[in-house]
Amino acid sequence: MDPGEHQCFVRSIVGRDAKKRPNPALGIDSDRPKPLGVGGSTEYHGCHCPPREVLGVGAALLAVFVAYVRVQARVAGVAQDYCGPMAKPGRIFLIALTALWLGITPASLQLAWGPDGSWGLMAAALVAIMVGCVITAARRLLRASRFLRVSTP
């Protein structure tokens, strides 16, 4: 990457393109920097659906939250709880299966959906992980609260 491309990339990330003018493709409406995930990145080609990158970041943050719930329950005195549909093995299995399918099938057999048909099976897997992580965190919290209610005098 040459220095000119690097400057353009960095300015795009913080909310400015290389010439400091609005860039509707990125959802940028001013030359002020915007944090990632706020403003420009929530609009994708006129559709108010999150772009693929936000799905990946959201799935990663929810996976960390699921682990955080487990650790905090352990600190409160609850035994380690690895239950839930999207505990680490479930997430790994879903992503590995999706990557394997995408790697061995031709593009004509792959799912296309979303704005302009630009989302694929990996986006669907990330949405499934996000929903599953919310369910897993809720289950762990409920199990921990039940244990703590019973065990405290």
Image (cartoon, rainbow, N blue to C red):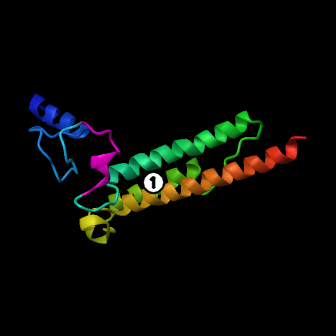
Whole-percent x and y of residue 77?
A: 77, 36
- Judged left or right of residue 29, residue 111 is right
Whole-percent x and y of residue 45?
A: 22, 59
For the N terminus, the image quarter is: top left
- Write down the residue under mark 1: 95
Q: Secondary structure at mark 1?
A: helix
Residue extending furthest top?
3
Residue extending furthest bottom?
109
For the C terminus, the image quarter is: top right
Q: Magenta segment, which residues?
A: 33-44
Q: Residue at x 15, y 32 (%)?
A: 7
Q: Main secondary structure of the magenta part?
A: loop
Three-letter code for the amino acid on which mark 1 is drawn:
Ile
Could you say which is closer to the camera, residue 39 or residue 78? 39
Mark 1 closeness class: few <14, some 14–19, many ≥20 residues within 10 Å: some
Whole-percent x and y of residue 2?
A: 11, 31
